[in-house]
Amino acid sequence: MTTLRIKNAVKRYPNGALAVEGVSVDVEDGELCVFVGPSGCGKSTLLRMVAGLEDVTEGEVELAGRVVNDLEPADRNIAMVFQNYALYPHMSVRKNLAYGLKNRGTPKAEIEAKVQEAAELLQIADYLDRRPGQLSGGQRQRVAMGRAIVRDPAIFLFDEPLSNLDAKLRNQMRLEIKKLQRRLGVAAIYVTHDQVEAMTLADKIVVLNAGKIEQIGTPAEVYGNPATTFVASFIGAPPMNLIPAEAENGAIRLGDQTLNLGLDHRGPVTFGLRPERAHIGASGEGLRMETGVVEELGAIRLVHGRVGPHEITVTQNADQPIPGAEAVLRVEASDIHLFDAETGRRV
Amino acid sequence: MKYRQILDHVVLLFGVFLMMGPLVVAFLTSTYNHVTIHRQGMQFGWGGQFLDTYQTVLTQQGGFSGEITGLLMTQNSIILGIGFAVGKIVVSMTAAYAIVYFRFRAGTFFFWVIFLTLLLPLEVRILPSYEVAQQLGLLNSYTGLILPLIASATGTFFFRQFFKSVPEELLEASRIDGAGPIQFFWDILVPLSRTMMAAIFIIMFVVGWNQYLWPTIMTTEEQYFTLVRGIQSVMQQMIGADIPYYNEALAMAMLAMLPPALVILIFQRMFIKGLVEQEK
């Protein structure tokens, strides 16, 4: 079953600016769907349209089988976790969790039971009588999630929930969010600009750029078969090398070098190669590369250099010898991505 | 470093001396007999009539009708001060709430219209204000003393700035939690504004307490006299052959200063406590 169906959603602001241009996404039951993209790509706007905090200019938002375009956020059966937690600073944790239920007219005993259950699930039962101001960032994050859980929503909406935490805590909370979502089996949308978060959390990734969907797919699909140069450069770290090239006679010409790949495409293309898919060696057949700066990352190292006039970065295991000033990149044909030079679409 | 500290203290002590000196002299003088004061001027010692003077001031029935005592005047002043401050807070909070959260078209325009009223203090519009109050039958009543004064551009401005600093996400979270506009105001904004309310209460209580012109015009019956008016009437009533009761006037001035000072002392604590406890 499909929990959420967004059909051709458009968001146009009164001043005419288009934030979301005709986006359609389905979120299946129990699925964790990540909206990822650079800031200003419309991912948060789309989430807020689902939440009911922004009006839907055109199109439909259908949640659990009914169109919710004109419903108030409170009547939509959603729960949202905000970037800055948005906890009520003057209320205890217990009251923060209970506030929404109280407003719905839930009986007191039931509220108490639900708050207790959520608190134990999130291991915040000891802090129930504290104020948010007395909690650490991670604890506040849990309270914010607890407030979402007690509502028993049809879908969770996460709006960059981890961006206020430090790096270590972020990794830990990321894993916890995933475990929790699996355990509760409730569908979720998670908005982030961090592609690592997107890759690690998602069942389904929606890559957005300038209000449009660039690609929808599993993390493996988005990484392995990026549909556009935008997706190719956005997903993966360090990002994919993208070099303008010419395809002719089944070969790719990069400046004065030619790679034989047995393709039947012709014309100007963008040549894409993931840094971790190139094997760097001292000699042999492949792309000649002038090496420049080398960055050590511990297990691997990044080798920056040039192929012809174009910058390129490749990774290398740290146990391999550091290449000299001239090196050769051995590349498998299956690891090469080609994109149309004009449209940026995959060829 | 040390030299700087000494200098700082000298400056502070000088300030204290300037501000507290006259108060101390007034207090000491009020413990003397009025004849002594008339002959020898202000006093710098302890006159020994402290209890007598203050008891007289608090309980003696004064005025032409004899309906008013110092205690009653204090009570009137407190009613005026509290009514004035609470009224201003209520009106300016609701006005600021409307301006900040309900983006009706002319919101900004109305805000600036309210702000412009700062250019028209009571003294400028006192005749029309009196006329309106009089036609509403508010002369000689607490309502008449308080109601025409409680619209506040300053208060609206302060609350507007404060509401604008409240994160938008709190509003959104409460919308998702099913809180309507009134609930959001009552459950979220009012508790968050406690420190602001305390600060404005302090300022407005003192302003209300010190009102002189408006009460003088609005009330002619002596039972509505406030302390600030009382000081003047003590000085006035004995003019003639007798020596004015300087000591009682000074005592009344001391009494008139006490409650605002107390309010500041009490609420300042709350104010600081609120600031410390609040999240970031």
Image (cartoon, grey):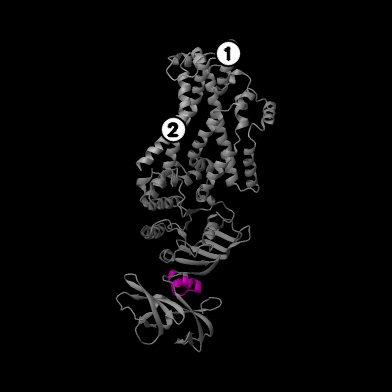
For label 1, the residue is B238
First to last magenta residue range: A219-233
For label 2, the residue is B14
The location of residue B252, given as percent across then percent down, is 51, 20
Does B232 lie within the magenta span? Answer: no
What is the chain identity of the residue bearing mark 2? Answer: B
| Predominant SS along the magenta part | helix
Residue lying furthest left in this view?
A: A319
Residue A184 versus residue A21: which sits nearer the camera?
A21
Residue lying furthest top in this view?
A: B241
What is the chain identity of the residue bearing mark 1? Answer: B
> Are both tags, 1 and 2, on one chain?
yes
Residue A227 can be seen, yes or no: no
The location of residue B273, given as percent across then percent down, is 42, 38
Name the residue type under label 2: Phe
Q: Quadrant of the N terminus of chain B?
A: top left
Q: Which residue is located at x 46 percent, y 42 percent?
A: A107
Q: Earlier in the sequence, mark 1 or mark 2?
A: 2
Would you call the spot at circle 2 few (<14 residues within 10 Å), some (14-19), or many (20 or more)? few
The location of residue A254, given as percent across then percent down, is 47, 84
> Left or right of B128: which side holds B20?
left
Name the residue type under label 1: Met
